[in-house]
Each structure stands twice: as C-alpha cells, then as structure tokens.
Image (spheres, helix red, strand yellow):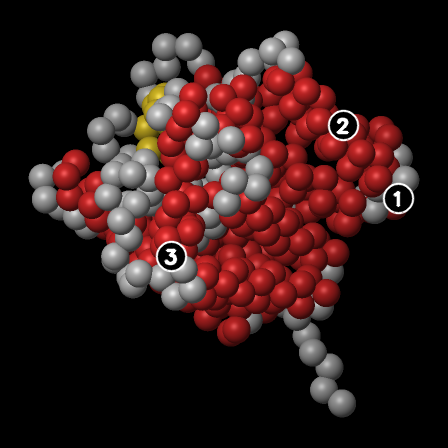
Amino acid sequence: ALPFLLLTLLLTAMGMVMVLSASFPSAYYENNGNGAYYFVRQGIFAVLGLAAMFGLSKMNYQRLRGVGRLLLWGSILLLVLVIVPGNPIAITENNATRWLGIRGTFLRFQPSELAKMAVVIYFSATISKKREKMQTWSQGIWPYVLILGVIALLMMREPHLSGTILIVCTGIVLMIVGGIKGWLIPLGIGGVGLVGTLYVILVQKGILHYGENRINTWRDPFNAEWYRGDGWQIAQCLIAIGSGGLFGKGLGESIQKMGFVPEAQNDMIFSVICEELGLFGAICLILLYLLIIWRFMVIANNAADLYGALLVVGIMAHISIQVVLNIAVVTNTIPNTGISLPFVSYGGTSILFLLSEMGLALSVSRGIKFEVT
C-alpha cells in the first residue's frame, strides 16, 4: 500500500506544479494579476480529494456494496438534470453543457465524474455476486449493456464524447474480467472498430456532421483552412511538443502557454509538460502512470475477494484508458475528444473523484493477507 500511496501523492504533486505553471499567464490576465487563481482552486479540491482518499482507505470496501446502486441511479439522475432545457444551474462552456453549479464561482460539479465511479462500484458489486451467471444474456450481458447505453445516450446529449468512450470501455473491461463468454470479446472489439470506421467514412462523405471539424483538423491541423479555426489548438500543441526537445526549456518557461494553446491547464497540459520538461519529463510522467498501473495489478491479483479485485481493475481501466486517450489526442494520434490527463489536468471534480478512487484501491490493499513461510 505504501508504494501505491507515495506514487499517488507524487503524481498529484506534479499535477499541482504543472497546473500552476500552465495556468499562470492566463490566470494573471483574467483575474487582475492573480496568477495563482487556478492553482488555488485546484488545491482546494485536491485537499478534499486527499481527505476522501484517506477516509476511504480506512473504510472496509465491503461496506460499499450496497452503495453502488444508489450512486448509479444518482449519477443518471444528475446526467438527466444537466441536459434539461432551461435548467438554471446547468453550466455551458465551449458549446458543451456538462456541469451543475453556480456560474462565476468554483461551486460546480461534473456528474460524469460521479458516473465513472458509480459504474466501477456497481458493476464490481453485482458481477462478483453472480459470476457464474455472467455468460447468460439475461443476467450477465443485457443489464450491463442497457446501463452503459443509457449513460452513453445521456452523455452524448451534453455532448461529452470522451467521457462516453471512457465509461463504456471501463464497463466492458469489468464485464470481460467478470467472465462473459470469450467469443464476445473479439466480437465486441470488432464491433467498436467497425462503428469507428463507419463514423469516419460518414463524416468524410458529408453524411454525418457531428465531429466533422475534429476529423478534418486531425487529418491536417496545419491546413490553412483549419489552422486559424479548429486546428489552432492542436497545431499549437504540436509546436509546443516539438520545441521542448530532449530536456525542455525549463519549468515555467513555456512560450505556447502564453495564449497560444487555449486553456493550457486543461486537456492540453501534456503539451506544456513536453515544452517545459522535454521528452525526458514526458517519459518520467508516463513511467509514473505505468508504475501506478503495475501497483493496481499487484493489488488486484492479491485481493481478498473477487469484489475487491474488480474494484481495482475498474479503477485501473478508467485511469489507464484516460491517460492513453489524452496523450493520443495531444500528440494528434487520434481526433480531439476533449479528455483530461488524470491527476495533472485542471479540474476540481476530476481530482476529487480520482483521489477517492485511489482510496478505494488502498482499502482493497489493506485487506490483503500475505502468508509468511
């Protein structure tokens, strides 16, 4: 548990440093000289998240079995509330309505973050109780597909493509580990690939227009037609990554964060890391993620029961998929989906729930009993 805890604290600390560095210029000009504005807000939620992590780590994770259903229905209700027309507490930014809260304050909440945690807890609790029935359609496949489908439809209405992909993939991983029929795995992977290919083809043919600009800018972000529009952000990220070199320009010395990369402290913070800390810093960050994933695997393999193992696998899937997607987006390997970098990107609700999930993993690790021979 101690190595896992230290890695979590180190990653959180690195995230706080990079949020301060990446956000300082924009915060300074947007908030009358208060360059630490975003850093302080992130710090408040990080402290709350650390408190939740330590609290949950001391709790017996078995007590959360009955909470999963409540969290799931609560998150679905909040997702519905987000998309209700005319809702005064629904907050829209960058043409997406994903938050509930009070405009102009840091009092806001992103229901999709709760949905991620709720899916992990509910799926783990129910799958562990009926693993022998997971290969049946009526009890092992259909109920979970229905839940993922409802959440996906609600989140696509926001729209929130990256969150939808993340939750659906996490749920599928838990179903696979939970014991669904082996032949469904390649079928599912093939189905996802087919849908993705069909989507790109329809966009290119002009039949489907959702995400059309993102596909076009992904193919050629420096094209004159897109560069000054939707291609600007990813083009500036690529410039930042390339200009960082091997060891970077130095912490705080990024040029692209000076208004070139929009909202550099958010989804595109990895480009600032590459520019300031270079390839070396980027590799160190990736190694931190790999070490945490390795510790997840150790905890899951030695968990006292299936429920604990599934909890850890679900959290591991959520974090690892999110890391891969974010870095792929920032490096223009895949089209921009608007996904944050766990523990590093600015986002209060995100850091709060991420640290809470780490508390659950620590709780499972505390239940491991090693035999002394």
Residue at image position (33%, 39%) is: 261
Q: Amino acid at mark 3?
A: Gly
Examine the rendered structure and indicate whether residue 11 appears above or below residue 26.
below
Is disc 2 in contact with disc 3, using a CB cutoff of under 8 Å? no
- Judge whether residue 46 can be spotted in this image: no
- Judge whether residue 310 can be spotted in this image: yes
Q: Which residue is mark 3?
A: 244
Q: Amino acid at mark 2?
A: Leu
> Which labelled disc corresponds to residue 194?
2
- 203 vs 227, left or right, is right
Give the position of the C terminus as an image quadrant.
Answer: bottom right
Give the position of the N terminus as an image quadrant.
Answer: bottom right
Examine the rendered structure and indicate whether residue 280 appears above or below residue 343.
below
Q: Label 1: few (<14), some or many (≥20) within 10 Å?
A: few
Residue at image position (66%, 16%) is: 202
Examine the rendered structure and indicate whether residue 146 appears above or below residue 328.
above
Q: Amino acid at mark 1?
A: Gly
Q: CA distance from mark 1 to mark 2?
A: 19 Å
Observer-nearest of 330 and 52? 330
Quadrant position of residue 322: top right
Observer-nearest of 326 and 78? 326
In front of the other: label 3 or label 1? 3
Give percent across and percent down for residue 108. 33, 33
Observer-nearest of 141 and 214? 214
Give percent across and percent down for residue 272. 36, 51
Question: N-terminal of the two: label 1 or label 2?
Answer: 1
Q: Which residue is mark 1?
A: 182
In front of the other: label 2 or label 3? 3
Q: CA distance from mark 3 to mark 1?
A: 45 Å
